[in-house]
Structures are given as structure tokens and as C-alpha cells.
Amino acid sequence: MSDAMDDRRKGLEEEYFHRKNKEAVEKMREKMRIAAAAKAAGSSSLECPRCDGGLKVNTFEGIEVDVCDKCGGLWLDAGELEQLTKKDSGGWFSGLWNSFNDN
Ligand SMILES: [Zn+2]
């Protein structure tokens, strides 16, 4: 195996991983675009992280929560738990939030 062949192979590998990375990023962007569009339309097409069910957006006291239509799992976006704790001062959620943030 000559060095030129090695370099060529290395180049191909790098090209391969570069392409794979690009594909992954594009897939992620597409997923986020679909999720944002679905959220704007009042329905979420997000898949449940736990099962293959779909997440439906429920609004409770002005806070959107994603509830799985299959396993019933409830998911919060970043900041939503914090919003909940503000509405729940002294309650269970604010206790949970404080326990995360005390450390
Ligand atoms: Zn689920």
C-alpha cells in the first residue's frame, strides 16, 4: 500500500464523515422546522422520546406541555418547568425546580 493510496483512502473517509455529518444536521433542521410548523398550527408532529407515539400540545394555564397520545408521557420544553414553578410557588413543582438548582 503506497502513501498516495493511504492519503486517498483517508480523504475518502473524511469526505464520507463530512457528508454524514451534513446529512445529520440537515435531518435535524428538517425535524425542527416540521416541529415549529406543527406547533404554530396547534398540533405537534414530534415523536415521543420514549415510545413511537406522537406528542400533542396541551395548554395548561398558559403553559404549553407536550403529552404523548400513546404512553401518556408529559414533556416540557426548556423554560416551561421554570414557568410552572413560578405559578406553583411553594408547591411541588417549585420544590422540584429548587432541588435541581440548589446543587
Ligand atoms: Zn410515548
Image: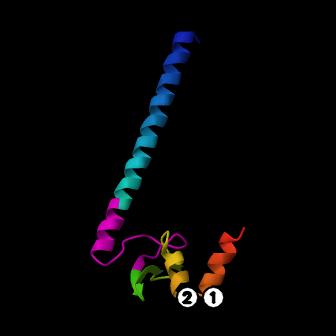
Placement of 26 over or under 9, stated as above or below: below
State the quadrant of the N terminus.
Answer: top right
- Comparing marks 1 and 2, which lies closer to the viewer? 2
Tell whether circle 1 marks a residue whose Cβ is less than 8 angstroms from ligand 1: no
Q: Identify the residue under disc 1.
A: 92
Q: Which residues are magenta?
A: 33-56
Report x, y in % for residue 14: 49, 29
Q: Nearer the viewer, residue 24 or 5?
A: 24
Taking the spot 45% from the left edge, 41% from the top edge, the residue there is 20
Taking the spot 45% from the left edge, 35% from the top edge, the residue there is 18
- Hey, which residue is sitting farthest right in the picture? 103
Report x, y in % for residue 19: 42, 37
Report x, y in % for residue 95: 66, 83
Residue 72 visible, this orientation: no
Residue 30 visible, this orientation: yes
Q: Nearer the viewer, residue 95 or 17?
A: 95
Mark 1 and mark 2: Cα distance apart in space:
7 Å
90 lies left or right of 47: right
Q: Identify the residue under disc 2.
A: 88
